[in-house]
Amino acid sequence: MASPSMSANSMLTRFKFAKLLRQDQGGRRIILEGTISGQPALLLAERGNFDTNPAYLSAFGRLMVHVNNLGDNDIYHWYLANSLPDNSADQPTPPDLKINLIYPCTDKHIKKYRFQRSRFVTETPEIYVMHVRPYMQRAREEGRLNWVFNIIDGKSEQENVLYRSAEARVEDDYLLLPDLNWDRKTIGSLHLLALVVRRDIWTVRDLTKRDVAWLRKMRAVIAQQVSTMYEGLEGDTLKFYIHYQPTYYHFHIHVVHVDLEPAHTQGVGKAMGLDNVISQLDTISGGEAAGMQDVELSYTVGEASELWTEIYLPLKEV
Protein backbone atom coordinates (compact mmCIF):
# COMPACT_ATOMS: atom_id res chain seq x y z
CA MET A 1 0.00 0.00 0.00
CA ALA A 2 1.37 3.42 -0.96
CA SER A 3 2.49 5.74 1.77
CA PRO A 4 -0.16 8.39 2.62
CA SER A 5 2.52 11.05 2.24
CA MET A 6 3.46 9.94 -1.27
CA SER A 7 1.73 12.06 -3.91
CA ALA A 8 0.48 10.65 -7.18
CA ASN A 9 3.19 12.51 -9.07
CA SER A 10 5.83 11.22 -6.68
CA MET A 11 4.74 7.64 -7.19
CA LEU A 12 5.05 7.99 -10.95
CA THR A 13 8.44 9.67 -10.86
CA ARG A 14 9.76 7.00 -8.46
CA PHE A 15 8.60 4.15 -10.66
CA LYS A 16 11.59 2.04 -11.64
CA PHE A 17 11.10 0.19 -14.90
CA ALA A 18 11.93 -3.53 -15.01
CA LYS A 19 10.37 -4.86 -18.21
CA LEU A 20 7.66 -4.37 -20.78
CA LEU A 21 4.83 -6.82 -20.07
CA ARG A 22 2.61 -6.00 -23.02
CA GLN A 23 1.90 -3.59 -25.83
CA ASP A 24 -1.55 -3.69 -27.34
CA GLN A 25 -4.43 -1.68 -28.85
CA GLY A 26 -2.37 -1.11 -31.96
CA GLY A 27 0.57 0.20 -29.95
CA ARG A 28 -1.54 2.76 -28.07
CA ARG A 29 -1.19 1.07 -24.65
CA ILE A 30 1.82 -0.29 -22.79
CA ILE A 31 1.95 -2.25 -19.54
CA LEU A 32 5.20 -1.93 -17.61
CA GLU A 33 6.43 -4.00 -14.69
CA GLY A 34 8.61 -2.29 -12.11
CA THR A 35 8.91 -1.18 -8.52
CA ILE A 36 8.19 1.83 -6.35
CA SER A 37 10.22 2.05 -3.15
CA GLY A 38 11.17 -1.60 -3.57
CA GLN A 39 7.56 -2.80 -3.88
CA PRO A 40 6.30 -4.41 -7.12
CA ALA A 41 4.20 -2.16 -9.31
CA LEU A 42 2.48 -2.22 -12.70
CA LEU A 43 2.18 0.92 -14.80
CA LEU A 44 -0.46 0.90 -17.55
CA ALA A 45 -0.04 3.84 -19.92
CA GLU A 46 -2.61 4.55 -22.60
CA ARG A 47 -2.82 7.47 -24.96
CA GLY A 48 -5.70 9.73 -24.08
CA ASN A 49 -8.49 10.94 -26.35
CA PHE A 50 -7.88 13.83 -28.69
CA ASP A 51 -9.07 17.24 -27.56
CA THR A 52 -12.10 18.13 -29.69
CA ASN A 53 -12.11 21.82 -28.75
CA PRO A 54 -12.33 23.78 -32.05
CA ALA A 55 -9.48 26.03 -30.93
CA TYR A 56 -7.20 23.01 -30.57
CA LEU A 57 -8.37 21.34 -33.78
CA SER A 58 -7.86 24.52 -35.79
CA ALA A 59 -4.21 24.53 -34.72
CA PHE A 60 -3.70 20.78 -35.00
CA GLY A 61 -1.54 20.90 -38.11
CA ARG A 62 0.75 23.51 -36.54
CA LEU A 63 1.16 21.65 -33.24
CA MET A 64 2.85 18.61 -34.76
CA VAL A 65 6.65 18.57 -34.64
CA HIS A 66 9.39 16.31 -35.98
CA VAL A 67 7.22 15.12 -38.84
CA ASN A 68 8.73 12.08 -40.54
CA ASN A 69 7.46 11.25 -44.03
CA LEU A 70 6.84 7.48 -44.29
CA GLY A 71 5.84 7.65 -47.94
CA ASP A 72 3.28 8.86 -50.44
CA ASN A 73 1.46 7.53 -53.47
CA ASP A 74 -0.88 9.55 -55.64
CA ILE A 75 -3.16 11.44 -53.18
CA TYR A 76 -2.17 9.38 -50.13
CA HIS A 77 0.56 10.50 -47.72
CA TRP A 78 1.77 8.87 -44.46
CA TYR A 79 3.71 10.37 -41.56
CA LEU A 80 4.92 9.82 -38.02
CA ALA A 81 4.96 12.93 -35.82
CA ASN A 82 5.19 14.23 -32.28
CA SER A 83 2.30 16.02 -30.63
CA LEU A 84 4.62 17.19 -27.84
CA PRO A 85 8.02 18.91 -27.96
CA ASP A 86 11.14 16.97 -27.03
CA ASN A 87 11.78 16.44 -23.34
CA SER A 88 15.30 17.86 -23.28
CA ALA A 89 15.83 16.70 -19.68
CA ASP A 90 15.43 13.07 -20.64
CA GLN A 91 15.18 11.01 -23.80
CA PRO A 92 13.67 12.65 -26.89
CA THR A 93 9.91 12.18 -27.01
CA PRO A 94 9.14 9.33 -29.46
CA PRO A 95 6.58 9.87 -32.22
CA ASP A 96 3.10 9.48 -30.77
CA LEU A 97 1.03 10.22 -33.86
CA LYS A 98 0.55 8.15 -37.01
CA ILE A 99 -0.83 10.53 -39.61
CA ASN A 100 -2.58 9.59 -42.86
CA LEU A 101 -3.23 12.51 -45.21
CA ILE A 102 -5.51 12.31 -48.25
CA TYR A 103 -4.91 15.32 -50.49
CA PRO A 104 -6.65 16.33 -52.59
CA CYS A 105 -9.57 14.26 -51.31
CA THR A 106 -12.93 13.76 -52.99
CA ASP A 107 -16.49 13.83 -51.72
CA LYS A 108 -16.40 10.02 -51.72
CA HIS A 109 -13.53 10.09 -49.21
CA ILE A 110 -15.45 12.50 -46.99
CA LYS A 111 -18.54 10.29 -47.07
CA LYS A 112 -16.46 7.24 -46.22
CA TYR A 113 -14.89 8.74 -43.11
CA ARG A 114 -17.87 10.75 -41.82
CA PHE A 115 -19.83 9.06 -39.04
CA GLN A 116 -22.78 7.19 -40.48
CA ARG A 117 -25.17 4.47 -39.44
CA SER A 118 -24.60 1.05 -40.94
CA ARG A 119 -26.93 -1.49 -42.51
CA PHE A 120 -26.50 -5.26 -42.78
CA VAL A 121 -27.28 -6.44 -46.29
CA THR A 122 -27.28 -9.73 -48.18
CA GLU A 123 -25.82 -9.78 -51.67
CA THR A 124 -27.26 -12.63 -53.72
CA PRO A 125 -25.52 -13.81 -56.88
CA GLU A 126 -28.28 -12.02 -58.83
CA ILE A 127 -27.80 -8.71 -57.01
CA TYR A 128 -24.06 -9.02 -57.56
CA VAL A 129 -24.37 -9.53 -61.31
CA MET A 130 -27.12 -6.97 -61.92
CA HIS A 131 -26.11 -4.19 -59.55
CA VAL A 132 -22.86 -4.59 -57.60
CA ARG A 133 -20.58 -5.72 -60.42
CA PRO A 134 -21.52 -2.71 -62.61
CA TYR A 135 -20.90 -0.44 -59.59
CA MET A 136 -17.43 -1.99 -59.18
CA GLN A 137 -16.75 -1.43 -62.88
CA ARG A 138 -17.60 2.28 -62.56
CA ALA A 139 -15.39 2.63 -59.49
CA ARG A 140 -12.41 1.09 -61.31
CA GLU A 141 -12.93 3.31 -64.35
CA GLU A 142 -12.89 6.45 -62.17
CA GLY A 143 -9.19 5.95 -61.49
CA ARG A 144 -9.51 4.94 -57.84
CA LEU A 145 -6.90 2.21 -58.38
CA ASN A 146 -4.10 4.40 -59.73
CA TRP A 147 -2.14 4.22 -56.48
CA VAL A 148 -2.37 0.40 -56.48
CA PHE A 149 -1.19 0.10 -60.07
CA ASN A 150 1.66 2.54 -59.32
CA ILE A 151 2.97 0.10 -56.73
CA ILE A 152 2.52 -3.01 -58.86
CA ASP A 153 4.12 -1.36 -61.91
CA GLY A 154 7.11 -0.16 -59.89
CA LYS A 155 6.33 3.55 -60.24
CA SER A 156 6.02 4.34 -56.53
CA GLU A 157 6.54 2.97 -53.01
CA GLN A 158 9.16 0.48 -54.14
CA GLU A 159 11.13 1.25 -50.99
CA ASN A 160 8.14 -0.10 -49.03
CA VAL A 161 7.84 -3.41 -50.89
CA LEU A 162 8.93 -6.11 -48.47
CA TYR A 163 8.68 -9.03 -50.87
CA ARG A 164 7.87 -9.54 -54.55
CA SER A 165 7.24 -13.09 -55.73
CA ALA A 166 8.71 -14.63 -58.87
CA GLU A 167 6.17 -17.26 -59.91
CA ALA A 168 6.46 -19.37 -63.04
CA ARG A 169 3.50 -17.45 -64.46
CA VAL A 170 3.75 -13.67 -64.17
CA GLU A 171 0.01 -13.40 -63.60
CA ASP A 172 0.41 -15.43 -60.39
CA ASP A 173 2.82 -12.93 -58.83
CA TYR A 174 2.09 -10.78 -55.81
CA LEU A 175 3.91 -8.35 -53.54
CA LEU A 176 3.89 -7.65 -49.83
CA LEU A 177 4.06 -4.23 -48.18
CA PRO A 178 3.04 -2.54 -44.91
CA ASP A 179 -0.56 -1.41 -44.51
CA LEU A 180 -0.77 2.39 -44.32
CA ASN A 181 -2.27 2.15 -40.80
CA TRP A 182 0.69 0.25 -39.30
CA ASP A 183 3.48 2.23 -37.62
CA ARG A 184 5.97 -0.28 -39.07
CA LYS A 185 7.63 -1.01 -35.74
CA THR A 186 5.07 -2.40 -33.26
CA ILE A 187 5.15 -6.14 -33.99
CA GLY A 188 2.03 -6.80 -31.91
CA SER A 189 0.03 -4.60 -34.30
CA LEU A 190 1.73 -5.82 -37.48
CA HIS A 191 -0.48 -5.25 -40.51
CA LEU A 192 0.67 -6.07 -44.03
CA LEU A 193 -1.01 -6.18 -47.43
CA ALA A 194 -0.47 -8.72 -50.17
CA LEU A 195 -1.35 -7.20 -53.55
CA VAL A 196 -1.77 -9.55 -56.48
CA VAL A 197 -0.34 -8.54 -59.85
CA ARG A 198 -3.18 -9.88 -61.96
CA ARG A 199 -6.02 -7.46 -62.63
CA ASP A 200 -8.84 -9.85 -63.45
CA ILE A 201 -9.53 -10.61 -59.78
CA TRP A 202 -11.27 -7.56 -58.32
CA THR A 203 -12.64 -9.10 -55.12
CA VAL A 204 -13.30 -12.42 -53.40
CA ARG A 205 -16.25 -12.77 -55.79
CA ASP A 206 -13.83 -13.53 -58.66
CA LEU A 207 -12.18 -16.48 -56.91
CA THR A 208 -12.97 -19.94 -58.25
CA LYS A 209 -11.96 -23.53 -57.54
CA ARG A 210 -9.04 -23.19 -59.96
CA ASP A 211 -7.50 -20.59 -57.63
CA VAL A 212 -7.25 -22.88 -54.59
CA ALA A 213 -3.70 -24.10 -55.20
CA TRP A 214 -2.51 -20.55 -56.00
CA LEU A 215 -4.05 -19.14 -52.81
CA ARG A 216 -2.66 -21.93 -50.62
CA LYS A 217 0.85 -21.46 -51.97
CA MET A 218 0.62 -17.68 -51.60
CA ARG A 219 -0.47 -17.99 -47.99
CA ALA A 220 2.33 -20.43 -47.16
CA VAL A 221 5.05 -18.35 -48.81
CA ILE A 222 3.88 -15.12 -47.17
CA ALA A 223 3.83 -16.76 -43.74
CA GLN A 224 7.37 -18.02 -44.30
CA GLN A 225 8.61 -14.65 -45.57
CA VAL A 226 7.08 -12.71 -42.70
CA SER A 227 8.56 -15.07 -40.11
CA THR A 228 11.95 -14.50 -41.74
CA MET A 229 11.61 -10.71 -41.81
CA TYR A 230 10.39 -10.25 -38.24
CA GLU A 231 12.16 -12.06 -35.43
CA GLY A 232 9.91 -14.05 -33.13
CA LEU A 233 7.02 -14.31 -35.59
CA GLU A 234 5.89 -17.75 -36.73
CA GLY A 235 3.25 -18.80 -39.21
CA ASP A 236 0.70 -19.49 -36.49
CA THR A 237 1.07 -15.96 -35.09
CA LEU A 238 -0.40 -14.52 -38.27
CA LYS A 239 -3.99 -14.07 -39.38
CA PHE A 240 -5.02 -13.76 -43.03
CA TYR A 241 -8.30 -12.20 -44.11
CA ILE A 242 -10.08 -10.56 -47.04
CA HIS A 243 -12.48 -7.62 -46.95
CA TYR A 244 -15.85 -7.70 -48.60
CA GLN A 245 -16.80 -5.13 -49.52
CA PRO A 246 -13.20 -3.92 -49.86
CA THR A 247 -12.17 -0.28 -49.95
CA TYR A 248 -10.80 -0.68 -53.46
CA TYR A 249 -11.55 -3.24 -56.14
CA HIS A 250 -8.21 -4.95 -56.71
CA PHE A 251 -7.75 -8.26 -54.92
CA HIS A 252 -5.56 -8.03 -51.83
CA ILE A 253 -5.09 -9.98 -48.61
CA HIS A 254 -4.60 -8.54 -45.13
CA VAL A 255 -1.94 -10.16 -42.96
CA VAL A 256 -2.02 -9.19 -39.28
CA HIS A 257 -0.58 -10.34 -35.98
CA VAL A 258 -3.07 -12.56 -34.15
CA ASP A 259 -2.75 -10.33 -31.08
CA LEU A 260 -3.81 -7.21 -32.97
CA GLU A 261 -7.03 -6.26 -31.22
CA PRO A 262 -9.88 -6.61 -33.72
CA ALA A 263 -11.40 -3.37 -34.90
CA HIS A 264 -14.58 -3.17 -36.97
CA THR A 265 -12.50 -3.93 -40.07
CA GLN A 266 -11.92 -7.46 -38.71
CA GLY A 267 -15.51 -7.99 -37.61
CA VAL A 268 -18.44 -9.93 -38.98
CA GLY A 269 -19.83 -8.08 -41.96
CA LYS A 270 -16.45 -6.88 -43.17
CA ALA A 271 -13.72 -9.55 -42.94
CA MET A 272 -13.62 -13.09 -44.33
CA GLY A 273 -10.90 -15.48 -43.16
CA LEU A 274 -8.68 -16.51 -46.07
CA ASP A 275 -8.46 -20.10 -44.84
CA ASN A 276 -12.24 -20.33 -44.68
CA VAL A 277 -12.55 -18.95 -48.21
CA ILE A 278 -10.00 -21.47 -49.50
CA SER A 279 -11.86 -24.32 -47.80
CA GLN A 280 -15.19 -23.12 -49.18
CA LEU A 281 -13.77 -22.95 -52.71
CA ASP A 282 -12.19 -26.39 -52.36
CA THR A 283 -15.44 -28.06 -51.29
CA ILE A 284 -17.99 -26.12 -53.35
CA SER A 285 -19.84 -28.26 -55.87
CA GLY A 286 -19.22 -27.84 -59.57
CA GLY A 287 -16.27 -27.65 -61.95
CA GLU A 288 -13.24 -25.37 -61.90
CA ALA A 289 -15.35 -22.34 -62.85
CA ALA A 290 -17.53 -22.69 -59.74
CA GLY A 291 -16.67 -20.18 -57.08
CA MET A 292 -17.63 -17.29 -54.85
CA GLN A 293 -19.82 -15.73 -57.52
CA ASP A 294 -22.30 -18.54 -56.80
CA VAL A 295 -22.91 -17.85 -53.09
CA GLU A 296 -24.73 -15.26 -50.99
CA LEU A 297 -22.52 -12.83 -49.08
CA SER A 298 -23.72 -10.64 -46.21
CA TYR A 299 -21.92 -7.52 -45.05
CA THR A 300 -22.38 -4.04 -43.60
CA VAL A 301 -22.65 -0.85 -45.64
CA GLY A 302 -22.80 2.74 -44.43
CA GLU A 303 -25.95 4.70 -45.13
CA ALA A 304 -23.88 7.38 -46.90
CA SER A 305 -22.19 4.87 -49.20
CA GLU A 306 -23.19 4.53 -52.82
CA LEU A 307 -23.78 0.81 -52.29
CA TRP A 308 -26.61 1.74 -49.94
CA THR A 309 -28.02 4.82 -51.67
CA GLU A 310 -27.80 3.46 -55.22
CA ILE A 311 -28.39 -0.27 -54.74
CA TYR A 312 -29.70 -1.59 -51.44
CA LEU A 313 -32.02 1.27 -50.45
CA PRO A 314 -33.84 1.21 -53.83
CA LEU A 315 -34.06 -2.60 -53.63
CA LYS A 316 -35.48 -2.35 -50.12
CA GLU A 317 -38.11 0.16 -51.22
CA VAL A 318 -39.33 -1.92 -54.17
Image (tube, rainbow, N blue to C red):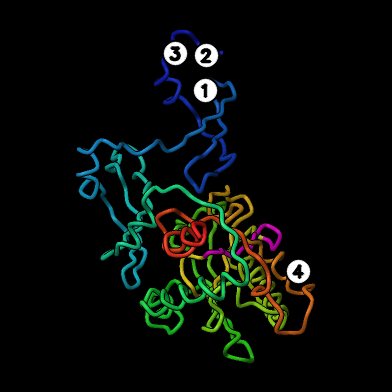
- Residue corresponding to mark 2: 2
**Cα–Cα span, label 1 and label 4:** 53 Å
Q: Where is residue 174 in the image (x, y as percent from the top left)?
A: 56, 79
**Three-letter amino acid code of the residue under disc 3:** Met
Comparing labels 1 and 4, the label whose residue is closer to the camera = 4
**Three-letter amino acid code of the residue under disc 4:** Ser
Q: Residue 206: give its label.
A: none
Query: For the magenta stretch, what is the residue range?
Result: 234-245
**Cα–Cα span, label 4 and label 3:** 60 Å
Pointer 3 or 1: first along the chain: 3
Q: How crowded is mark 3: few (under 14 residues within 10 Å), some or many (20 or more)?
A: few
Q: In the image, what residue occupies the spot 32% across and 52% down?
A: 81
Asked which quadrant contains residue 165, the reply is bottom right
Q: Position of residue 296 (x, y in %)?
A: 65, 65
Comparing labels 4 and 3, the label whose residue is closer to the camera = 4
Q: Residue 36: give its label.
A: 1
Along the viewing direction, whichever of 127 and 83 lies nearer the viewer: 127
Asked which quadrant contains residue 14, the reply is top left
Pointer 4 or 3: first along the chain: 3
Q: Position of residue 260 (x, y in %)?
A: 58, 51
**Three-letter amino acid code of the residue under disc 1:** Ile
Q: How crowded is mark 1: few (under 14 residues within 10 Å), some or many (20 or more)?
A: some
Is residue 283 rendered magenta in the image?
A: no
Q: Under tag 4, what secondary structure?
A: helix
Q: Are marks 2 and 1 in contact (CB under 8 Å)?
A: yes
Quadrant location of the N terminus?
Answer: top right
Q: Under tag 3, what secondary structure?
A: loop
With respect to residue 25, does 12 lie above or below? above
Q: In the image, what residue occupies the spot 52% across and 20% down?
A: 37
**Residue farthest toward the bottom in the current orientation of the protein:** 169
- Residue corresponding to mark 4: 279
Q: Under tag 1, what secondary structure?
A: strand
